[in-house]
Structure formats: structure tokens, C-alpha cells
Amino acid sequence: MQTKIQIFGNDKIRSVWDPEQEKWYFAIVDVIAVLTESENPQTYWRVLKKRLKDEGNETVTNCNALKLPATDGKMRLTDVADVQQLLRIIQSVPGKKAEPFKVWLSKVGAEILDESVDPELSIDRAVRNYRNLGYSENWINQRIKSIEVRKALTDEWNRSGLNEGEEYSMLTDLMYRTWAGMSSKEYKQYKGLKKENLRDNMTNIELILNMLAEASATELSKNQNPSTFVENAKVAVSGAEVARDARLSLKKRGSEAISPKNAKELGIRQLPFSNGTDSSEDF
């Protein structure tokens, strides 16, 4: 299953796409937070859930619990519902946002089906989301390109038989340590981040250096054809060294490429949920 953050206005809804059933499952507590603007949506949902169960509401009984990234960065079991179940739950939640949310749900459902046929549409949606968050066109172009570069590298890791998740995270962290001089955790602390996506808080030059590291590692991997984690780690370091040399060369000329500024300090609006920690996330 594919987890994804869906954007509704200025809010983020955690979701999971089930390719077999071809449907989205949404974190109910996130939906409750949007509809009620409650300071404690978990409590609101717990009380509502009990009331609906007492009333014999089968929708609540049939809701699943799936692991989704929580605000502390850990994967935690979270009550989720598909579109049909959510629509029934929404009927029990008073609020003026119910109707706009119903329209949004129908659009999300249609978009994923369209994107499965034409992947370019998912890129178009990402561009729109970044624009809505206040990123510049130049930054957006770099960010979209960085996703393409990252995908090429993870394709190489996948070809080598590495385990998506822990081993990808270890290699990513190793590359940050090499070219930026700090781990992903230290990099985020340097920028004053907690669970926000590191790459979404990079400046143009930081994105470019990270792309240089990953693109170099990809080319080296294609030439050397590593087959073990250790071999891939050596390739990752070699690729990151290319970006490190570029960063140090720039520094020697009077410009520090690594910036402590995050998206907020760059005038970009931030939303409550992140996409997860950058060391464990692919893009």
C-alpha cells in the first residue's frame, strides 16, 4: 500500500492507497480535525466512535486500522475509512465544511485513477500543491527535478535488491553525512525542523547539491553494478563526494551553500503534518 499526504485547503490528510481495491483510505482523525477544528480531534473521534457504535452504526464497526506516520514521526495504528465510510461518518459531524469536503473527496478519488493512466498528472498536482504553499516557480522546478533524480537512484537500489525502508534510509543518511557534513537528523536540527520534510525546507542551491550527489551516485551505480549493501554504500559515498567537493569549492569562493533557513523563514507556509522524516522517505 502507498501512504500519501493529501492537501485539503490549508490542512493535510494522511491517506493510504490500496491498489488491489483501487480505493483511498483516509485517517479519520485528520478528517475530524478539518471538519470540527477541534483542539483535540482524537478525543472528539473517540467519543463520536463510541456513540455511533452504541447506535449500531455498521460503518464504524467496519472501519480498519492501518499504520500511518504520526506527528512524532513513528508509524502508529490509525483508524481509517474509505470514501463511502467517510461520507457516512461526515453526516454525524456538524459543521460548515462538510459539503466542500465531500467535493474534495470525489476529486481525490478521480485523480488517483487518472494518474494511474497518465503519471504526468501526479506531477501537475504536486506543482499545484507547492504553489498553494507559497513556493517560487524556480524552487518548484528544482524540487520536481529532484524527485526525478531521486527516483532514478532508488531504481538502482531496487535493482541491487536492497530493502526499501531501512537500507534506503541508511544510504540516504550516509550521503547527507558525506556531502553536507551532517546526518539527516542533524541537518533538520540545524534548520530548526522537527518532523517536517527536509527537502521541502532546502534552498535552491541545497536541492541542486543533493541532486548532484544522487545523480552522480546513480551514474556510478550503472557503471559499477553493485550487488550488496556494502558495495552500494561505497557508490553512494563516491557520488556524495562529488557534491561535497562542489560545496567546498563554493565555500572557498565565499559562499556557504548549507543554509540554516527553513521554509518558514523563506516565507513559505507550513502545514501541521509532515511527509515523514527525510531519512526514511524516498522523495
Image (cartoon, rainbow, N blue to C red):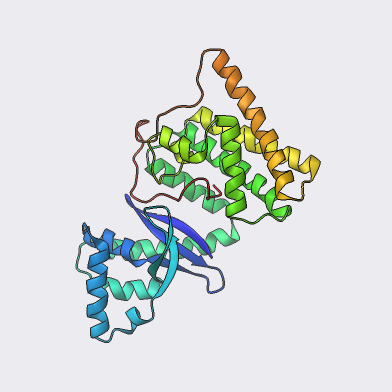
Residue 31 percent across, percent down from the top left: 31, 63
In the visual, does 172 lie left or right of 219?
left
In the rendered image, residue 190, in percent from the top left (x then y), is placed at 42, 32
Kindly tell me whether residue 92 is visible in this rendering: no
Position of 259 with respect to 172 (left or right) is: left
In this view, 201 is above or below 257: below
Q: Quadrant of residue 232?
A: top right
Quadrant where the N terminus sits is bottom right
Q: Is residue 273 above or below residue 219?
A: below
**Camera-nearest residue between 148 and 169:** 169
Q: Position of residue 102 (x, y in %)?
A: 33, 66
Q: Residue at x 23, y 60 (%)?
A: 40
Q: Position of residue 221 (x, y in %)?
A: 74, 42
**Residue that appears at 32% across and 49% down:** 10
Residue lying at the far front of the rendered structure = 230
Q: Residue at x 52, y 30 (%)?
A: 206
